[in-house]
């Protein structure tokens, strides 16, 4: 198998980055490229460093974006950069270099939901399906030509972290399918068709603006809770609400059968359309709402 | 308490029950998404808050380290 790429650089974090890294390492013998991994964002439970150690893949941690930009721009060989679960925005001066090709995994079906935290926004908007897109990176964020897409359903109880995991699995599946075509530069890409309503979701945006309005329909409240649920990873700050005139912070929530209801302090129960109850545990914050 | 922790592990990561090593994450027995599920369940069952600073590989080395974590947090409540 032949490729003109002499070097492959993987940047990312989490499960998808790890699986893709292992796959590219396994295929190294087929093509003979050099492989390295760059960790740009730190993750408490990351295993990529371990994978690199076990597989003898050069590993470097470059948390500073300027340093990373300088490092990548100094690459002279023909190089494929694989961006897998990576929030670093590649500068135009790098994207436009002739010896560099960059492919990125976006966790939505582009051109819909470009930008950050797409799994949250699709849940919040009540979408029934979403998916992943591998695309070439261009100067515009998430605007490059599409290499491959995979889709999946969004269940009625799906939380953001569960969907993120499902999308990472799809990202791996899609990557394994298109990797040879990318390396041989024979991908039949298709351009994205942008609608005038297309909007970019920014990292500073939070579904519901981070506020849970108890006057809303319980099913919408449930969507909001699920959309910002990434466990303890701190993707979003805890939702806030107002209970009995006092500001409160949401601690956790759960859908339960009505017979499981137990009266407890700082707990709300809201009826869902499917007959279950939405149990919400909160804690009061010091200030009263005026 | 131990019994409840083991029940949760059985539901979300049965392999953890038989694991006798010292690093379930590195050895691929448990992944970060399973940890999120387990943390969420532990919080609900024991009515405790597990702060993000505790959700690190060190506290999820094996079932014993998870039980130690829960015991500390329950005692602190």
Image (cartoon, helix red, strand yellow):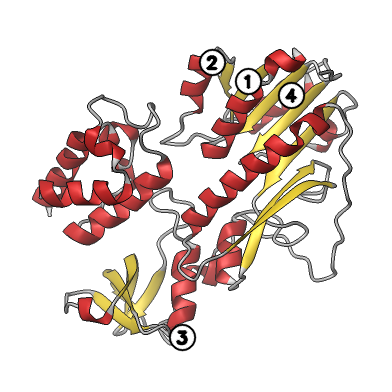
Find numbered disc 1 in the image and state the secondary structure of the residue it sits on. helix
User: Residue A72 — which label?
Assistant: 4
State the residue position of label 2: A55
Taking the spot 49% from the left edge, 15% from the top edge, the residue there is A53
Calculate the distance from the C-alpha at mark 1 to the C-alpha at mark 3: 49 Å
Q: Are marks 1 and 3 on the same chain?
A: yes
State the residue position of label 3: A217
Calculate the distance from the C-alpha at mark 3 to the C-alpha at mark 2: 51 Å
Residue B14, image quadrant: top left
Residue A129, image quadrant: bottom right
Tell us which disc is closer to us: 3 or 4: 3
Asked if the residues shown at circle 2 and circle 1 are in contact, with their CB atoms under 8 angstroms apart, the answer is yes
State the residue position of label 1: A25
Q: Could you tell which of marks 2 and 1 lies nearer the N-terminus? A: 1
Q: Position of residue A163 (x, y in %)?
A: 53, 56
In this picture, is A163 found above or below A227? above
Of residues A247 and B36, the one drawn nearer to the viewer in this rendering: B36
């Amino acid at each position: 198998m032949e490729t003109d790429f002499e070097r492959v650089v993987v940047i990312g974090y989490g499960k998808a980055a790890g699986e893709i890294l292992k796959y590219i390492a396994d295929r190294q013998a087929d093509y003979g490229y050099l492989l390295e991994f760059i960790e740009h964002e730190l993750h408490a439970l990351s295993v990529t460093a371990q994978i690199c150690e076990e597989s003898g893949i050069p590993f470097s941690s470059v948390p500073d974006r300027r340093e990373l930009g300088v490092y990548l721009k100094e690459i002279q060989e023909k190089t494929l950069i694989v961006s897998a679960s990576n929030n670093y925005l590649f500068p135009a001066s790098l994207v436009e270099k002739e010896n560099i090709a960059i492919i990125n995994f976006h966790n939505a079906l582009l051109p819909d939901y470009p930008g950050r935290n797409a799994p949250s926004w699709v849940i919040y908007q009540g979408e029934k399906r979403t998916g992943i897109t591998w695309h070439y990176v261009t100067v515009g964020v998430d605007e490059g030509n599409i290499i491959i897409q995979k889709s999946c359903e969004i269940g009625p109880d799906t939380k953001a972290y569960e969907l993120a995991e499902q999308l990472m699995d799809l990202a791996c599946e899609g990557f394994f399918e298109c990797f040879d075509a990318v390396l041989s530069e024979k991908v039949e890409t298709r351009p994205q068709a942008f609608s005038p309503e297309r909007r970019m979701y920014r990292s500073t945006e939070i579904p519901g603006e981070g506020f849970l309005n108890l006057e809303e329909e319980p099913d919408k409240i449930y969507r909001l809770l699920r959309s910002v649920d990434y466990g303890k990873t701190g993707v979003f700050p805890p939702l806030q609400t107002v209970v009995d005139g006092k500001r409160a912070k949401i601690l956790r929530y759960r859908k339960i059968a009505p017979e499981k209801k137990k009266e407890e302090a700082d707990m709300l129960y809201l009826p869902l359309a499917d007959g279950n109850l939405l149990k919400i545990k909160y804690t009061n914050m010091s200030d009263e709402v005026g | 308490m131990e019994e409840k922790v083991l029940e949760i592990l059985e539901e979300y990561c049965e392999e953890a029950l038989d694991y006798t090593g010292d690093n379930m994450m590195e050895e691929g027995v448990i992944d970060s998404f399973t940890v999120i599920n387990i943390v969420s369940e532990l919080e609900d069952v024991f009515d405790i808050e597990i702060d993000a600073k505790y959700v690190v590989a060190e506290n999820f080395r094996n079932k014993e380290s998870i039980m130690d974590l829960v015991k500390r947090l329950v005692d602190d409540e």
